[in-house]
Image (cartoon, grey):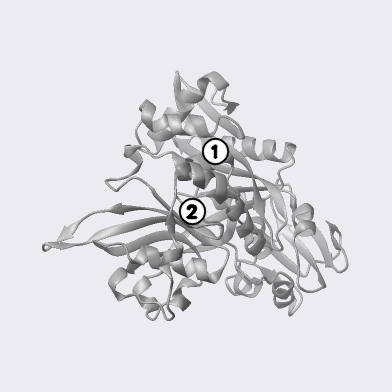
Amino acid sequence: MDSLRPERVPTDALPEFARAVNRHFYEGEGTEDVQPYLDAFATDYRAWWVHHRDRVAANLGVIETEISLTGGARLPVAAITAVGVAQTMRRRGLLTQLMRACLEEAQAQGEPLAALFASESAIYGRYGFGVAAQHRSYDAERLRINFRDPVDVRLVEETTSEAALEAWPALHARLGDEHGAVVGNSPGMWQLTVAADPPSWRDGATARRLVEVPGRGYAHYRIKGAEEALLPSGQVHVGEVFATDPEAYAALWQHLLDIDLTTRIRTWIRPVDDVLPHLVTDPLALHAADGPPLYVRILDLPRVLRERAYTTTGRCVIEVRDPAGPVDGRWHLEVGQETVCEPTTAEPEITLPVDALASVVFATVHPTVLAAARRLTEHRPGAAAALGALMAVDRGPWSPVMF
């Protein structure tokens, strides 16, 4: 137990693992704080740790779920979460060991991709993770926002967590038909985002409130009351908003913007090509800023490129720099009636590091931009532009639920 090597966490030790995760994220370690995670991830979850002197020195979890590709295909993904190292155990390579072990296991289990959200974004490029979905956050001034066209808020109804767990997963699944990089909610993730709601999670706000346009869209949020100079100045903290049609989407946002005794609406994982700024008369009042990106590590490039959809045909020889990694080398991609991706010895037209590869495959950053930033080398004039055209998408990548 004290060898400072990563090990899978035994089932009977998961409570100790969960408390360590919360400790390393400076959260409560009581039963109320950790039990929702234990209930949610009783299945479809892999836990790793490094144990040292009867303490958890480092921890990492993997949610077994799926991710969408352009065109709607889904592939298994190792959704990495709960990454932490005890402050007294840093600088010993524990995170590197954990990451290597979990990525090797993902490959062995046939997961061609791994994904994560990063509390500290500078860390994960060294492990081959690159930005697959950029996001926007809003800190909107409620009283300055008006819709260009009338919105019927009577479409929006309150619902219960039981009803939401029954109806919302089917709606969320449709999100991946429109956007790449959508990490699917496992049953446990649905429990955490809809049903579980201990007071310690609320930061002084209300319990989670759930609303929907039945069969068409949903939103969940909290309200944090406040007062300034004897006037109400509360905040609406939005967790997720999604709808399958424009009318339902506008109605849900109008509901959020109509909440009494509040002045700000805050949300932080919206798509870069969100419709909302185009629905309102003063988009600057949304105060858009960068939100947390989704990072993806490609483990099986041929499988990912074969499953991905394309709107045109073309070919490219891509050289990927992935030292000691699974996608290092040169790859011939040809998109026609069928998509072929296979190793080659041909001269490359493009060379890029593996972390930049995710941004190209998910059409997050255009290859010409990466070339201008010297993150991609073009060996044939026009190759970056041609690759960008081949990877083009109608709607940008978006993964709206953090894990």
Residue 79 drawn above or below residue 23: below
Q: Mark 2: few, some, or many residues within 10 Å (few <14, many ≥20)?
A: few
Residue 371: % across, % down: 63, 72
Residue at the spot of label 1: 188
Picture coordinates of residue 170, whole percent (x, y): 61, 51
**Considering only vertical position in the picture, is 272 above or below 240?**
below
Q: Which amino acid, by three-letter code, is at mark 2?
A: Ala
Which amino acid, mark 1? Gly
Q: Find out whether the residues at labels 2 and 1 contact each other: C-beta distance under 8 Å.
A: no
Q: In the current view of this chain or complex, which residue is farthest to the right?
A: 337
* Relative horizontal placement of residue 285, taking residue 99 as reference (left or right): left
Expressed as whole percent of the image width and height from the top left, the position of residue 355 reads 62, 56
Q: What residue is disc 2 on?
A: 122
Say left or right for 223 vs 164.
left
- Residue 133 appears in which quarter of the rendering? bottom right
- Which of the labelled discs sits on residue 224, or is there none? none
Say if 101 sits above or below 330 in the image.
above
Give the quarter of the image for residue 157: bottom left
In the image, residue 257 lies at what x, y percent?
35, 66
Task: Give the residue displayed 46% in from the left and 23% down from the top.
Answer: 16
Q: Is residue 50 visible?
A: yes
Q: What residue appears at the point 35 percent right and 27 percent down from the top-left corner?
A: 30
Q: Quadrant of the N terminus?
A: top right
Q: Is residue 110 left or right of residue 99?
A: right
Q: Give 300 or 339, whichever is nearer the viewer.
A: 339
Direction left: furthest residue: 230
Image height check: is 350 above or below 79?
below
